[in-house]
Image (tube, rainbow, N blue to C red):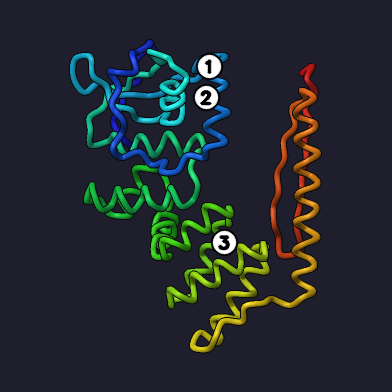
Amino acid sequence: MPNVTYNKTKNIPLKLIKPNPCQPRKYFDPESMDALIRSVERYGVINPITVREISDNEYELISGERRFRAAYSAGLTEIPCIILDTDGSDCAILSLLENLQREDLSFLEIAESYKELIKKKGITSRDLSRKLGKRTYDITEHISLMNLDPLVRKYIRSFKLTKRQAKALLKLKDKSLQIEATRKICENRLTESDTIEFINELTQTQSEPIPITPPSAKLNRIKDIQTLRNTISSAICLIRKSGMDVRYDEKTYDWGDEFTIIVKNNAT
């Protein structure tokens, strides 16, 4: 693990903090950022960011890029920071660790970070797995996702496809076929199990034209599920507007889809 000492928290002027060149988070959802900026404008930055001192009165950001950006946009001049006593060689590892522990990163951002660390820092997958406390297989599996075409990765981010769906797309070696299949998966809102079935069919005939349209019965089921999702989403928005704390989770299994809604008692 990286050698690091945690010093006390203190407020540091934003102008003294440099961005992290190895920032693992690459994509910032505009809607989510707008909500964070409004929160910072009203309440300030509640959770400190982490930085390291690189010279007198100069710091480098380790984690908390969203809060750092929101503070700037909200017009703050300083931000609470936890100062870590560590050198630059471990900065990228620490930044990734902080984000992984907070579960802030998408699987594609994790994959990009792993690949970047191995490429720029010259460490092996085995070394990286030891530093992060991850299995070597998990590291190499994530890195393999970077073999997907860049446009495919863009579709995955935009339509929030799962890691299982991304792994299934790796079976399609032809890039144009990979892109077209991804587009159809997104257009038809295929579930994980439907995606895997669709890809398996394509791998049998990769030299033939892609069977664009899944069976109509499957499409009807997909539309029904999407209607249910939209209904649940609308209901949750109304509940939240009433001031109640509601949590929503959706999981896809081979046997179907599971929707979980938890409404917390405000008195607890």
- Judged from the image, the secondary structure of the residue bearing numbered disc 2 is helix
Q: Are marks 1 and 3 in contact (CB under 8 Å)?
A: no
| Residue 94 placement (x, y as % from top left) | 35, 34
Q: Residue at x 61, y 70 (%)?
A: 196
| Residue 227 placement (x, y as % from top left) | 79, 54
> Which quadrant would residue 49 be assigned to in this image?
top left
Query: Where 87 sits versus 23, above or below?
Result: above
> Which quadrant would residue 213 be assigned to in this image?
bottom right
The type of residue carrying mark 1 is: Glu
| Residue 11 placement (x, y as % from top left) | 38, 11
Spatial CA span between label 1 and label 3: 38 Å
Local packing at callout 3 (Cα closer than 10 Å; few below 14, some 14-19, many 20+) is few
The type of residue carrying mark 3 is: Arg
Mark 1 or 3: in front is: 1
Nearer to me, 99 or 27: 27
Q: Quadrant of the N terminus?
A: top left
The type of residue carrying mark 2 is: Ile
Q: Are marks 2 and 1 in contact (CB under 8 Å)?
A: yes
Label of residue 41 in the image: 1
Left or right for 165, reference 28: right
Label of residue 37 in the image: 2
Spatial CA span between label 2 and label 1: 6 Å
Q: Residue at x 39, y 39 (%)?
A: 96
- Judged from the image, the secondary structure of the residue bearing numbered disc 1 is helix
Nearer to me, 124 or 186: 186
Left or right for 62, reference 105: left
